[in-house]
Image (cartoon, helix red, strand yellow):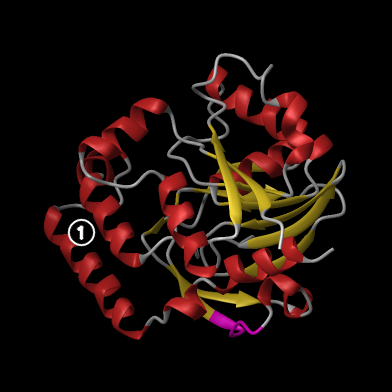
C-alpha cells in the first residue's frame, strides 16, 4: 500500500519549542508523530512551521502532494495581532486551496476558523488546564465519522484559554462542554474538509501534567488560573485520577477516525 503523505504544521514560536526542548518536553509535532505511529507506520510525514520559515516559496508549490494536514497546538492567542499569527492565517488559507483533508487541533482549529471567516475570543467561562471534562457530542456529532464508536460524553486532555465564538459559514457544530460551547466542528473551505477539535486527543495526560509544571509561574502570576503551587498540585492530583480511568484507544479515537478518513478514497 502506498504511503499517505501528511504535513504537520507546528503552531508554536521557535523560542517556545526551544524552551520545551531545553526542559525535556516534546514539541507538539513530536507528540503528534508519536501518536500517529501508534496507529500506523505507513505515513510520510513532513513538518512545517509558518512562524519560523521566512518564506513559503518552497512549500507552496508542493502543497498538493499532501493527502492530509494536521495543524496542532500553540501558546499563542489568535486575537493578538503579530506577524507570526498573520503568517499562520495566511498559510492556512493556502492550505485550503491545496489540501483536501485537514485535522485542526486546538490552536489549529482557531487558525482554521479565523482563516475561514469565523471568530475566536478569550473564553468567558474559564480555561482548560490539562483536562476538559464532560465534553458531550450533539446529534450532528453522533452522525459524524469523527466520533465513530466514541462515548457520547467523555473527558479529554486539553489546554486552552480561548474559544470559537463565531463559526465559519456552513460549519457544523459537533460537541460542547460547560467551558466551551464549540469543542468540535466540521466545515469546508476551498477544497478542504476541516475537522476541528478544541481539545487534544493526541496528547497524553502525563504530558499535560508536565506542561502544567512547566507553566506553573505563568498559570499563577500571568493567567491567574491558580492562587498557589498547592492549588496546582491539587489539580494535578485530579488529572492523575483521570489517568487511572482513561483508556488510550478511547482517548485517541478521533485521531484514528481521521486516519481512517485519510485512507479512504
Residue 117 visible somewhere in the drawing = no
Range drawn in magenta: 149-153
Q: Residue at x 79, y 37 (%)?
A: 64
Where does label 1 land, which residue?
A: 232
Residue 179 vertical placement versus 89 (above, below): below
| Left or right of 104, for residue 220 | left
Residue density around tag 1, few if under 14, some if 14–19, many if 20 or more, within 10 Å: many
Quadrant (top left, top right, bottom left, bottom right) of the C terminus:
bottom right
Task: State the image coordinates of residue 125 (x, y, percent, origin top left).
Answer: 49, 57
Residue 83 visible somewhere in the drawing = yes
Number of numbered tags placed on the structure image: 1
Q: Residue at x 25, y 66 (%)?
A: 235
Q: Residue at x 58, y 65 (%)?
A: 255
Q: Residue at x 58, y 85 (%)?
A: 151
Q: Residue 180 appears in which quarter of the rendering? A: bottom right
Quadrant (top left, top right, bottom left, bottom right) of the N terminus:
bottom right
| Left or right of 194, for residue 24 | left
Q: Of all residues shown, which one is farthest toward the front?
A: 1
**Nearest the eye: 100 or 5:** 5
Q: Of all residues shown, which one is farthest toward the left?
A: 230
Residue 21 vertical placement versus 138 (above, below): above
Amino acid at each position: 500500500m502506498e504511503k499517505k503523505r501528511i504535513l504537520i504544521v507546528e503552531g508554536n514560536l521557535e523560542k517556545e519549542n526551544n524552551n520545551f526542548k531545553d526542559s525535556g518536553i516534546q514539541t507538539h509535532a513530536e507528540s503528534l508523530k508519536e501518536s500517529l505511529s501508534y496507529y500506523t507506520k505507513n505515513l510520510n510525514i513532513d513538518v512545517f512551521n509558518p512562524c519560523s520559515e521566512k518564506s513559503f516559496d518552497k512549500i507552496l508549490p508542493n502543497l498538493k502532494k499532501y493527502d492530509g494536514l494536521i495543524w496542532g497546538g500553540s501558546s499563542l492567542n489568535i486575537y493578538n495581532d503579530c506577524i507570526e499569527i498573520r503568517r499562520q492565517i495566511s498559510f492556512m488559507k493556502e492550505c485550503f486551496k491545496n489540501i483536501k483533508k485537514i485535522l485542526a487541533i486546538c490552536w489549529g482549529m482557531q487558525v482554521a476558523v479565523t482563516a475561514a471567516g469565523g471568530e475566536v475570543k478569550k473564553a468567558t467561562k474559564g480555561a482548560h488546564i490539562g483536562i476538559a471534562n464532560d465534553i458531550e457530542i450533539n446529534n450532528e456529532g453522533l452522525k459524524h465519522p469523527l466520533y465513530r464508536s466514541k462515548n457520547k460524553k467523555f473527558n479529554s486532555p486539553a489546554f486552552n484559554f480561548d474559544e470559537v465564538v463565531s463559526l465559519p459559514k456552513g460549519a457544523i457544530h459537533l460537541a460542547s462542554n460547560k467551558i466551551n460551547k464549540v469543542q468540535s466542528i466540521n466545515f469546508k473551505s476551498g477544497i478542504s474538509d476541516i475537522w476541528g477539535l478544541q481539545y487534544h486527543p493526541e496528547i497524553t495526560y502525563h504530558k499535560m501534567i508536565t506542561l502544567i509544571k512547566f507553566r506553573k509561574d505563568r498559570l499563577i502570576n500571568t493567567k491567574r488560573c491558580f492562587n498557589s503551587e498547592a492549588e496546582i498540585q491539587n489539580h494535578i492530583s485530579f488529572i492523575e485520577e483521570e489517568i487511572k480511568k482513561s483508556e488510550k484507544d478511547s482517548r485517541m479515537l478521533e485521531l484514528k477516525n481521521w486516519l481512517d478518513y485519510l485512507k479512504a478514497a
